[in-house]
Amino acid sequence: QVQLVESGGGSVQAGGSLRLSCAASGRTFSSSAMGWFRQAPGKEREFVAAISWSGSSTTYADSVKGRFTVSRDNAKNTVYLEMNSLKLEDTAVYLCAISTTANVLSRSLSMYGSWGQGTQVTVSS
């Protein structure tokens, strides 16, 4: 069972930046795609970004494309989400998840097996 722990969340003004980290334990991290999702109060969990096992392929939700960058360091068992030009609507709990595949960059929650507890990101004006 892989355990995922997110960190790096916090409060930031609109236009600012944050870098989230997701540290994984377990042998399957380096052979699995990873995803970032977010959930705002009263809303459904939504896809943010995903990265293949090697880091060579990424995909993003339209709402964050050009502002967010997902990356990973398999030697450190960590995946990152660099968030720039943050907007009020980016406020949410951000969660990382490990995919059941190596290279399929799915936007579907059902394709992800283990989830972290999440880290809060609050963007204010």
Image (tube, rainbow, N blue to C red):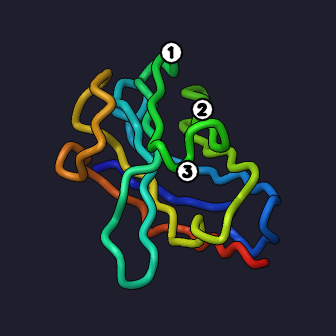
* Residue at the (28%, 50%) spot, across then down: 1
Which sits in the foreground, 66 or 56? 66
Residue neighbourhood size for the residue with mark 1, other residues' Cα within 10 Å, grouped as few (<14), some (14–19), many (≥20):
few
Q: Is residue 42 above or below residue 119?
A: below
* Residue at the (32%, 21%) spot, across then down: 103
Distance, label 2 to label 1, CA atoms, is: 9 Å
Asked which secondary structure carries label 1, the reply is loop
Mark seen at residue 22 = 3
Which sits in the foreground, 66 or 8? 66
The residue identified by callout 2 is 71
Q: Earlier in the sequence, mark 3 or mark 1?
A: 3
Asked which secondary structure carries label 2, the reply is strand
Distance, label 3 to label 2, CA atoms, is: 11 Å
Task: Say left or right for 71 vs 112.
Answer: right
Pointer 3 and pointer 1: residues touching (CB < 8 Å)?
no
Q: Considering the image in quadrants, where does the C terminus appear?
A: bottom right
Q: Earlier in the sequence, mark 3 or mark 2?
A: 3
Pointer 3 and pointer 2: residues touching (CB < 8 Å)?
no
Q: Earlier in the sequence, mark 2 or mark 1?
A: 1
For badge 3, the amino acid type reads Cys
For badge 2, the amino acid type reads Ser
Residue neighbourhood size for the residue with mark 3, other residues' Cα within 10 Å, grouped as few (<14), some (14–19), many (≥20):
many
Asked which secondary structure carries label 3, the reply is strand
Question: Mark 3, mark 2: which one is toward the viewer?
Answer: 2
* Residue at the (58%, 68%) spot, across then down: 89
Pointer 2 and pointer 1: residues touching (CB < 8 Å)?
no
The residue identified by callout 1 is 56
Task: Say left or right for 125 vs 74.
Answer: right
